[in-house]
Amino acid sequence: MEKLRPWLPLFSILLASFLDIWLPDSSLHTPTKAKYFLWFNIILGIFFTAGAIRTIFWRNKGKNFITQAPFYAAVIFLLNIFNLVSKKYALLPVIFFPSLDRVFSVIVEDSFFLASCLASSAQLLFAGFAIGAAAGILTGIAVGFNKVLSYWINPLIRAIGPMPPTAWIPIVLVVFPTTFSGSVFLIALSVWFPTTIMTAGGIQNIPNVYFEVASTLGAGKYYQILKVGIPAAMPQMFLGIFNGAGISFVTLMTAELLGVKNGIGWYINWQKDMMAYANVYAGLIIIAVSFYLLVMLLFKVRDRVLVWQKGVIKW
Amino acid sequence: MVGAVNINSVTKKFAADDGSEITALNGIDLKVRAGEFISLIGPSGCGKSTLLRLIAGLSKPTEGTLFIDESEIKGTSYERGLVFQNAMLFPWLNIYDNIAFGLKARKVYRSSKDRVKSFISMVSLDGFEKSFPHQLSGGMIQRAGLARVLINDPKVLLLDEPLGALDAFTRMNLQDELIRIWKKEKMTMILVTHDVDEAVYLSDRIVVMTPRPAKIEKIIDVNLSYPRARSGSEFLYLRTQILKILNYAGKTEEPGYYI
């Protein structure tokens, strides 16, 4: 049984492919140019065959693959079931639950337009995220170190911070000259608040002894802020940035309803209005994949910056 | 020789949470000679750490003055290095950067890079430059903490129970290390400890302090040459004497009757 484990995804793929070829399609579903689900299975099949073969020859490298194999098999099995329920037997309302062939056909045939939507969303997100994170870290440091600034700014942060960024939309529409700048502002705002709070909190919770050590070693005030305060608060800062990233994804989707004529959130909304649900699913898949990659990227950056934490704190 | 510390009728009071005042130190007078190894010993609450923090410049006396050589102590300085109990290495810096911290903070790192290497060797941490503090044992951490302070070439080295958290064998090794460093660098050493053996083993003079009121009870000269035998008769005599002053000597009289 253990020997079969790396081959489970392949069995699942073969089953799905066999059923897709063997069973007749329901007449309710519009046929697509190519059998995309089958192609999807073939590509995955090549990938998983290679993975399974690798575990035979390099035992150590394939450990992760073997652990994950049943999970991949189950995911493919669920796609298989969905394929049966939709394309083969049309058990679900056809208009809201299109076949996987249709969804994949959108991703393939509409790829240029989807890529341009993704690019313009990325532009909004990165601009807003960079501004928000930078502003958040700076405010956090200022509030964390300076008692006077903390006195004056803290109540403001506490009043503005918990408001959902999207509640600002009516004002943003009036104040900002372009919808782009308005959307960037909203995204920046959603990253700014958690980053500020966590950075300031992180700095205030640094054990005073670290500053005492630094000052007896000859460090001046600014050197202490730069080389003790900021690195010591870095784990908290990252927590804030992670929170902010999560909120900024939500804000991005809403901000694209402001009137920008491009972007992946806008695409989904537009296709929904057109009742083109295959396109909606295609957009959702692209969002899921790209946000997953962004979060992984953030984790990689964190592991780089916080390498000293390995074995100290886990989250 | 430089590094003499003059403490003139220093009093330190803290405000307690309920508004009352706690006297941590009451009119302390002490002259530490340049280049001597002096220990402050006493039970917790006797103000020995408070006195050390005053010398370091981490807090200011309520009354009285502290001088190092001719200048009054007004704040911290790298010339009065302080080694903390758990070394308090910066967890986000590796051993090399921890030890180089003082040089970088004082902006003399570029001109004295070689010092870092030599101080890492001095505390036998070669090969651990890239390790982070949490990967090291307690003894290694404390040695790194020592090197981090010594690299600044302080006139006075203040040691706040630096070996308190270590196991007995590591502690004895580091005590020998301290003597070796002291003989080599010839700085003034002020050690706060609650280990009587450690005080007798290391110091020229021992300042015995008692709590409530926090004051100096007695200053004992240790006229023994280095290296010292841990179980020599003079050693044991001094040890007993100190314990007697602190009322920890235990029962020493003959029993009144025999069974």
Image (tube, coloured by chain):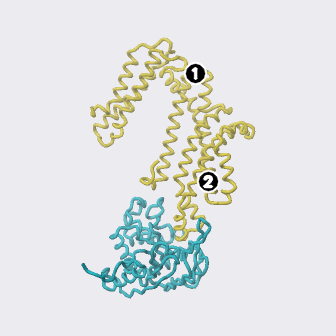
Q: Chain of mark 2?
A: A
Task: Confirm whether circles 1 and 2 share one chain.
Answer: yes
Q: Amino acid at mark 1?
A: Ala
**Tag 1, which secondary structure?**
loop
Residue under the point 60% across and 52% down: A137
Displayed quadrant of residue A75: top left
Q: Chain of mark 1?
A: A
**What residue would you read off at disc 1?**
A276
Of callouts 1 and 2, which one flags the residue occurring earlier in the amino acid sequence? 2
Seen from the viewer's position, the closer of residues B65 and A135 is B65
| Residue A88 in view (yes/no) | yes
Q: Which mark is residue A184?
A: none
Q: In screen coordinates, is B172 left or right of A154?
A: left
Residue under the point 42% across and 61% down: B133
Displayed quadrant of residue A126: top right
Separation (CA) of disc 1 from disc 2: 45 Å
Q: In this picture, is B90 found above or below A76?
A: below
Letter of the chain shown yellow in the rendering: A
Residue under the point 49% across and 18% down: A33
**Tag 2, which secondary structure?**
helix
**What residue would you read off at disc 2?**
A140
Q: How many marks?
A: 2
Of the two numbered discs 1 and 2 in the rendering, the one whose residue sits closer to the viewer: 2
- Residue A243, x across and y down, in percent: 56, 44
Instruction: Name, please, the residue furthest toward the top.
Output: A27
- Residue A81, x across and y down, in percent: 42, 22
- Residue B216, x across and y down, in percent: 49, 82
Q: Quadrant of the C terminus of chain B?
A: bottom left
Binning the other alpha carbons within 10 Å of mark 1 as few (below 14), some (14 to 19) or many (20 upward) gives: some
